[in-house]
Image (cartoon, rainbow, N blue to C red):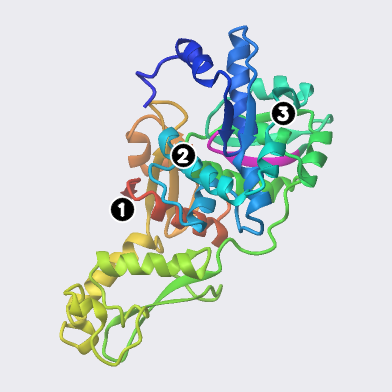
Amino acid sequence: MLKSAPKFYEVAKRIIELTEDCIIVAHNAEFDYRILRTEFKRLGYDFKRKSLCTVELAKDLIPNQASYSLGKLVRSLGIPVTDRHRANGDALATVKLFKLLQTKDSAKHIIQSSIKESYKAKKIDSRFIDIVNNLPSVTGVYYMHNADGQIIYIGKSRNIKRRVNQHFTATNSKSKKLQLRVDSVTYEETGSELVALLKEIEEIKRVKPMFNRSRKRTLFTHALYAFTDQNGYLNLKIDVADGRKHPITTFSNHQSAKHFLEQAAEQYQLCLKLTGLEKTENTCFNYKIDICHGACISQESPELYNRRVQELIEKFSYAHQNMVIIDRGRDVDERSAIYIKDGSFQGIGFFNLNYQINNINVLESIITKMDNNKDIQHVIQSYLRKHKRLKIIKLT
């Protein structure tokens, strides 16, 4: 995406002209403004502008929101947003949010008091500058050490540099305590977000850093189960996760489970009655719109209907399967491998040649063994649902 994009020095002059006598408005303005100042500093220019943060304004003007992240906040306020996480989409969403906030601030007191001169903006502690500057903007796992070299915090991020910088500028109680003890930060690049997630869970469990909260509950609360009814049809059911049962896949909450099943019912042309999404004695709604083929009234044979249900189960459950999930690697010519053997997660590895994963003996030699548990299975299944284009190699 950035191959043909200009370098910062090529657009720096235009940025100065555009922002002259202006106030920079941004969602989490402290971060964006700091990035601008840092880039200009590298060019030897002292860039100073007033800034205004829509996060701080929203907390004052629209209190008690579940989240103040841009995406969740604008959705809760009914503000349409397109092209999320791209400059244009996020900027337009911020403009619409800012207009709403201006309307709510009828006395204009908060708007005026929220405008900050550049010298009043929060700055990163000077002792952390070198640490942040030496970190890359890559996906991976990072480790915070105290003066004795002991790991006191483990985290994962798609952008290690940005995430650590957020730790060093945050003002909550936990971050302040962490800032007092951090002496250095090391990292391990993974390329794959899934590999980073798996490594983070494994290493927090093994190292038990003092600032990582021990997991009080599992990552998932609900699961999708299958059973055969008295007429021979495979039924699907969302239920509270039960460690004694074998689920098809698991979910963080009931809503995400229901959303998944609704999409699956449409994709695999399933009956809403037999998926538990609709309670009816007669035909389901999907039958009326020609998606369901009549399993709800025994019009379609159990054999034909169950074949499609089985396709869904095989796609989203890796029970008893031998396979390798292929994801991004640390370099352009490298890929990561997540190895599943007989339905059990074995570990992760990196490879450059397809021969390495097609040969079982070689594959198992490059894999770093990791523990398998229900939280790990949930993380993998959730990732597969969200990243449908991931390459999966079935092994015989």
Q: Quadrant of residue 374?
A: bottom right
Rendered view: 54 above or below 124: below
Rendered view: 241 above or below 18: below
Q: What x and y, as percent, mark residue 247?
A: 45, 70
CA separation in Å, label 2 and label 1: 46 Å
Rendered view: 289 above or below 325: below
Element type at mark 1: loop
Asked if residue 40 lies left or right of residue 381, the reply is right
Q: Earlier in the sequence, mark 1 or mark 3?
A: 3
Asked if residue 212 lies left or right of residue 368, the reply is right
Q: Earlier in the sequence, mark 2 or mark 1?
A: 2
Mark 1 or 3, which is nearer the eye? 3
* Highlighted magenta segment, given as a residue range: 152-159
Identify residue for label 1. Answer: 396
Marks 2 and 3: CB-CB under 8 Å? Answer: no
Marks 1 and 3: CB-CB under 8 Å? Answer: no
Query: Any magenta on residue 154?
Result: yes
Q: What x and y, as percent, mark residue 369?
A: 55, 46
Q: What x and y, as percent, mark residue 102?
A: 57, 45
Confirm whether residue 373 shows in the render.
Answer: no
Identify residue for label 2. Answer: 90
Identify residue for label 3. Answer: 121
The kind of residue on which mark 1 rests is Thr
Residue 106 versus residue 275: which sits nearer the camera? 106
Mark 2 or 1, which is nearer the eye? 2
The kind of residue on which mark 2 rests is Asp
Image disc number at residue 261: none
Residue 377 versus residue 345: which sits nearer the camera? 377
The kind of residue on which mark 3 rests is Ala
